[in-house]
Image (cartoon, helix red, strand yellow):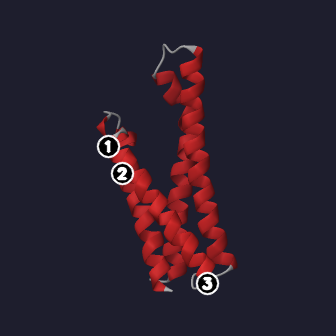
Amino acid sequence: MSPYVMLLAGSALTAFWGVMHLVKTGPVVAGFEPLGDDNRHVLRMEWILEGVTLCFVAVLVSVFTLWRGPDALASVIVFRLSALFLLVMAAVSLFTGAKASPLPYKLCAPIFTTAAALILVGSFAA
């Protein structure tokens, strides 16, 4: 499989999950009601920030893939750091959200790990 395909697939998966965080922020916050104003604001902020961060990583990987190419040194550094970030997110998710009963929380760690694997393998395939 082409490094471009792996890198862009990992990026797309990361972007998809980031957008899902943004779309589902309202329903997630509503699911925790009743909340005080401070807790509601913090919960909303955290969900939005995770979504934006995931989208940023996806854009970064996509831009370096398409602009510099998968074999440029700067690209390889971006890809491997992005994969490391996603693996850290997977570990955090595994020990926190995966213990919650709703299925989407359990999906974070496998989705982050899959995206990281695609990006990492793509970074070595070039």
Q: Mark 1 or mark 3, which has the lower sequence index?
A: 3
Identify the mark nearer the N-term, 2 or 3: 3
Q: Which amino acid does label 3 sit on?
A: Ala
Question: Which of the labelled discs sits on residue 95, or is there none?
Answer: 1
Specify few, some or many for label 1: CA neighbours under 10 Å numbering under 14, 14-19, or 20 or more: few
Q: What element carries label 1?
A: helix
Q: What element carries label 3?
A: loop
Would residue 25 appear left or right of 121 to someone viewing this image? right
Q: How many marks?
A: 3
Q: Where is residue 122 in the image (x, y as percent from the top left)?
A: 48, 77
| x then y, percent, for residue 110 | 35, 55
Q: Name the residue under label 2.
A: 91
Q: Residue at x 67, y 80 (%)?
A: 68
Residue wearing tag 3:
72
Q: In which quadrant of the rendered image does the N terminus lie?
A: bottom left
- Amino acid type of the residue tagged 2 in the rendering: Ala
- Residue 26 visible here: no
Contact between labelled residues 3 and 2, with CB atoms less than 8 Å apart? no
Does residue 62 lie above or below 95 as drawn?
A: below
Residue 43, compared with residue 17, is above or below; it is above
